[in-house]
Image (cartoon, helix red, strand yellow):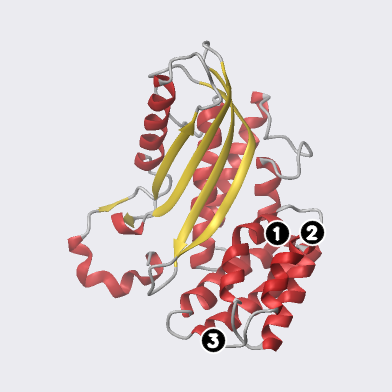
């Protein structure tokens, strides 16, 4: 487990190389839709992005090697021109370990349909927060900060606030680039909407949910499954309050989508009254998934 358990691990820290790199990221680029071009550029970019993400010190927080956040950036190239113009889709995923278990819980699973950029093979990939003039590094940095900020929110209440502000700074600075994905009211699921909704005062219950769900719920499951499951059930009320406060926000839907399979697994057992309550809550949050939520009602009690 990460920072929150560091006191337990202090006697053994001398065994671990300490650093500031926060992310343990896998990068994959799928160029199967592109025909008749040299595919080496895609492999070069893939390796360069992996190095950039994993070797950048994104914050001043200190992470041991085994504490780094597991995540992935999956890029599907839709169009490519020899002048270095890319039109792609990006899927970003991150996980968080559940305490005292081998289970990794999904924290973010998000698809960005408008990741367009320019890249010439072997160009250096550098991020300068004071100058946002490159869409490739701006988008990657935005999601790196989002991953770290969300992870910190699962570790302490509103713990990612300072890091999430970095996302806001990038969005504000990116307005002058004219690239898709950064503008207000352009799309309810674009980069602007996601970060400004997430830190909105009305969605504070959602950020509290991120902590309650993981720290008082999921992290308790290994020690006491019933207590952990009950805490997860109670935390869903926070998510429901957030959606009620900001019904037009896509963020609660993104969280539910990310957690859907996990919720189905957690509530595949338990008291009928608890499962009925969770079912009602999830139906309010995401009625389109009724067929999945029905499995919770039909689960066995033990």
Work out which quarter of the rendered image holds the N terminus and state it: bottom left
In the picture of the structure, the residue carrying the numbered disc 2 is: 246
Tell me the residue at 50%/58% (across/down). Answer: 151
Q: Earlier in the sequence, mark 1 or mark 3?
A: 3
As helix, strand or loop, the secondary structure at mark 2 comes to: loop
Work out which quarter of the rendered image holds the C terminus and state it: bottom right
* Label drawn at residue 137: none
Q: Is residue 270 left or right of residue 54?
A: right
Tell me the residue at 71%/57% (across/down). Answer: 253
Q: How many angstroms separate mark 1 from mark 3 (CA)?
A: 25 Å
In the picture of the structure, the residue carrying the numbered disc 1 is: 252
Provide residue 154's location: percent of width, then percent of height: 52, 65
Q: How many angstroms separate mark 2 from mark 1 (CA)?
A: 9 Å
As helix, strand or loop, the secondary structure at mark 1 comes to: helix
Q: Residue furthest top?
A: 83
Image height of 36 relative to 6, above or below: above
Provide residue 30's location: percent of width, then percent of height: 49, 32
As helix, strand or loop, the secondary structure at mark 3 comes to: helix
Q: Are marks 2 and 1 in contact (CB under 8 Å)?
A: yes
Crowding at mark 3 (Cα within 10 Å: few <14, some 14-19, many 20+) = some
Q: Quadrant of residue 158?
A: bottom right
Mark 2 or mark 3: which is in front? 3
Q: Are marks 2 and 3 in contact (CB under 8 Å)?
A: no
Q: Earlier in the sequence, mark 2 or mark 1?
A: 2
Crowding at mark 1 (Cα within 10 Å: few <14, some 14-19, many 20+) = many
């Amino acid at each position: 487990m990460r920072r929150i358990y560091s006191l337990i691990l202090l006697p053994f820290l001398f065994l671990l190389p300490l650093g500031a790199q926060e992310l343990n990221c896998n990068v994959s680029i799928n160029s199967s839709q592109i025909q008749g071009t040299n595919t080496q550029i895609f492999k070069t970019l893939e390796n360069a992005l992996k190095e950039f993400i994993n070797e950048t010190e994104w914050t001043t927080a200190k992470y041991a090697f085994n504490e780094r956040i597991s995540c992935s950036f999956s890029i599907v190239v839709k169009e490519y021109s020899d002048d270095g113009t890319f039109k792609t889709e990006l899927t970003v995923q991150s996980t968080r370990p559940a305490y005292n278990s081998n289970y990794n819980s999904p924290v973010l699973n998000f698809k960005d349909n408008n990741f367009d950029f320019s890249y010439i093979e072997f160009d250096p990939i550098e991020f300068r927060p004071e100058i946002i003039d490159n869409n490739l590094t701006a988008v990657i940095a935005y999601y790196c900060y989002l991953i770290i900020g969300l992870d910190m929110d699962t570790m302490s209440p509103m713990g990612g606030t300072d890091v999430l502000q970095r996302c806001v700074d990038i969005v504000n600075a990116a307005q002058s680039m004219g690239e898709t994905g950064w503008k207000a009211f352009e799309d309810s699921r674009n980069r602007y909407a996601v970060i400004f909704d997430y830190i909105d005062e009305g969605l504070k219950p959602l950020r509290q949910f991120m902590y309650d769900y993981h720290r008082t719920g999921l992290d308790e499951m290994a020690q006491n499954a019933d207590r952990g499951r009950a805490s997860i059930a109670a935390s869903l009320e926070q998510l429901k309050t957030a959606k009620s406060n900001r019904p037009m926000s896509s963020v609660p839907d993104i969280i539910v989508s990310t957690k859907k399979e996990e919720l189905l697994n957690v509530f595949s057992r338990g008291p009928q009254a608890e499962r009925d309550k969770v079912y009602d809550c999830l139906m309010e949050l995401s009625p389109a998934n009724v067929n999945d939520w029905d499995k919770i009602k039909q689960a066995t009690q033990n």
